[in-house]
């Protein structure tokens, strides 16, 4: 069901996600950043 | 769970990044033996991962299963009760999945093409040729070889093909397919089915005779001989942070490996003695195809990170080739890659067979056993590139490097092919 809201946008490859995750830095910071972007977007 | 209210609204990219974050944290806890914390992360991941979802959801579902199995293995009773030993039950499924992989991704066909070309060049002008295959299960490669040999200007040689494998029925099927083709092409041909696994293979039963020119072919087989009992203690290790974990890995991938010394590997008595016995058969050529990744580190975190990067590229490749709903795609992901991931992450010691290593380490191991490199030809490279053009898929590449070939998805090498000779040329 979670793939439904993917819409028609071209999706980021898993490889690109791993690269982006690496750029985002440490494991703990990353969770915070994702959380924050969630809060900001809603 | 504290996350669950907004989990449903995550977009693919955010969910993917969050899954990576959860997976790496979970691996840290699994490696450290913190079962309660690991369990909590597994619970979060299970809300997001799915074998039928987008690429990262699919990858996450196989990696979490592998992590869970690793934890469960610390209770052998529990583990065995829900995983009764039945190695053969899944065999036909695996064989079917491998066949699908052969037909949907060009990697195995490229390997067959390039390997055959190296064998043809080494066997040029030879009148009696013996080809030994170490565990290939598909007759496709040798059908093509028979056709090429039949078209030689000097005429076909007397040909013997010995195939080593554990499954008698499969070997006999291969034998009958090849014998029919040889008869049709009028090639004097003998097929030799060697029912054995690689570990217990005594090369004497290959009956290599003096006067015949020998070619050995190994496709995705040699790494299983790196299995050893001695690394269970080193299995858990220091936890990684992103900085020392993922970045280091990506950097390593991008700037060739200079940071990780290729000399820094554990000797493997089993593989060494096997390679030495093959060398003793004096092959004119030995062609080796292997996965181009280091999945043989003793540290779980390192292995996890390497495998995550490797299989991300592999799953991306399937994503670009097949629709998400395809049952064939799910079969390959589950039966081939899912099984490999499980073995890399949850097993140790003799049970850990998927010990993929990069070409530079194979080169060292083969050179230590006395082999010299035979550069693959430019003609082989051209043939491989032509095959890719015919295949039509964007994103696949063949790269030549030091006389060896790398088959890539985008910029990431996934498989290597190299050729060797018992004699050093230098």
Image: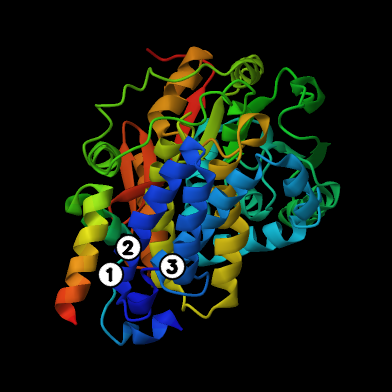
Local SS, label 1: helix
Local SS, label 3: helix
Q: Residue at x 33, y 55 (%)?
A: B21
Residue B182, image x and y in percent?
74, 51
Foreground residue among A2 and B353: A2
Q: CA distance from mark 2 to mark 3?
A: 10 Å
Q: Is there a contact, CB below 8 Å, between mark 1 and mark 3?
A: no
Residue B373, image x and y in percent?
43, 24
Foreground residue among B405 and B199: B199
Q: What number is the disc on residue B39?
A: none
Foreground residue among B117 and B5: B5
Residue B306, image x and y in percent?
39, 42
- Find disc 2 in the rendering and name its residue: B18
| Category of crowding for the residue at label 2, using alpha-carbon neighbours closer than 10 angstroms: few (below 14), some (14–19), many (at least 20) | many
Q: CA distance from mark 2 to mark 1?
A: 6 Å
Q: Residue at x 43, y 50 (%)?
A: B26
User: Which part of the image, by quadrant, shows the N terminus of chain B?
Assistant: bottom left
Q: What number is the disc on residue B57?
A: 3
Mark sitting earlier along the chain (2/3)? 2
User: Which part of the image, by quadrant, shows the C terminus of chain B?
Assistant: top left
Residue B375 in sight here: no
Residue B284's image quarter? top right
Local SS, label 2: helix
- Find disc 1 in the rendering and name its residue: B14
Q: Please state the chain letter of the residue tagged with numbered disc 1 in the rendered image.
A: B
Q: Residue at x 39, y 74 (%)?
A: B4
Mark sitting earlier along the chain (1/3)? 1
Q: Are marks 2 and 1 on the same chain?
A: yes
Q: Is there a contact, CB below 8 Å, between mark 2 and mark 3?
A: no
């Amino acid at each position: 069901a979670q793939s439904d809201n993917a819409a028609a946008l071209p999706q980021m490859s898993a490889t690109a996600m791993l690269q982006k995750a690496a750029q985002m830095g440490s494991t703990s910071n990353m969770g915070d950043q994702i959380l924050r972007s969630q809060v900001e977007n809603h | 769970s504290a996350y669950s209210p907004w989990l449903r609204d995550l977009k693919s990219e955010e969910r993917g990044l969050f899954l990576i974050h959860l997976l790496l944290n979970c691996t840290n806890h699994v490696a450290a033996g913190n079962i309660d914390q690991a369990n909590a992360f597994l619970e979060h991941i299970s809300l997001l991962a799915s074998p039928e979802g987008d690429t990262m959801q699919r990858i996450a579902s196989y990696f979490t299963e592998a992590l869970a199995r690793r934890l469960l293995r610390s209770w052998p009773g529990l583990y065995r009760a829900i995983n009764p030993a039945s190695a053969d039950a899944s065999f036909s499924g695996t064989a079917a999945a491998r066949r699908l992989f052969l037909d949907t991704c060009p990697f195995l066909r490229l390997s067959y093409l390039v390997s055959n070309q190296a064998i043809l060049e080494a066997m040029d002008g030879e009148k009696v040729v013996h080809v030994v295959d170490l565990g290939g299960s598909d007759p496709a490669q040798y059908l093509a070889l028979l056709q090429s040999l039949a078209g030689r200007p000097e005429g076909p040689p007397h040909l013997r093909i010995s195939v080593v494998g554990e499954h008698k029925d499969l070997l006999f099927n291969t034998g009958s397919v090849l014998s029919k083709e040889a008869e049709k092409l009028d090639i004097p041909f003998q097929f030799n089915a060697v029912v054995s696994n690689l570990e217990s293979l005594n090369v004497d039963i290959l009956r290599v005779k003096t006067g015949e020119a020998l070619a050995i072919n190994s496709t995705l087989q040699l790494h299983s001989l790196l299995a050893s009992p001695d690394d269970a203690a080193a299995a858990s290790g220091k936890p990684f942070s992103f900085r020392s974990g993922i970045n280091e890995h990506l950097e390593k991938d991008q700037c060739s490996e200079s940071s990780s010394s290729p000399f820094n590997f554990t000797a493997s008595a089993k593989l060494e003695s096997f390679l030495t016995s093959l060398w003793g058969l004096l092959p004119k050529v030995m062609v080796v195809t292997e996965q181009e990744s280091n999945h043989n580190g003793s540290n779980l975190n390192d292995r996890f990170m390497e495998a995550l990067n490797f299989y991300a590229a592999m799953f991306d490749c399937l994503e670009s080739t097949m629709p998400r709903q395809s049952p064939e795609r799910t079969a390959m992901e589950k039966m081939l890659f899912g099984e490999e991931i499980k073995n890399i992450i949850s097993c140790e010691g003799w049970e850990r067979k998927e010990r993929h290593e990069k070409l530079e380490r194979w080169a060292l191991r083969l050179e230590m056993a006395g082999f010299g490199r035979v550069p693959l030809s430019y003609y082989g490279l051209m043939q491989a590139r032509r095959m890719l053009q015919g295949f039509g898929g964007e994103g696949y590449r063949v790269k030549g490097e030091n006389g060896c070939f790398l088959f890539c998805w985008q910029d990431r090498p996934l498989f290597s092919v190299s050729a060797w000779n018992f004699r050093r040329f230098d």
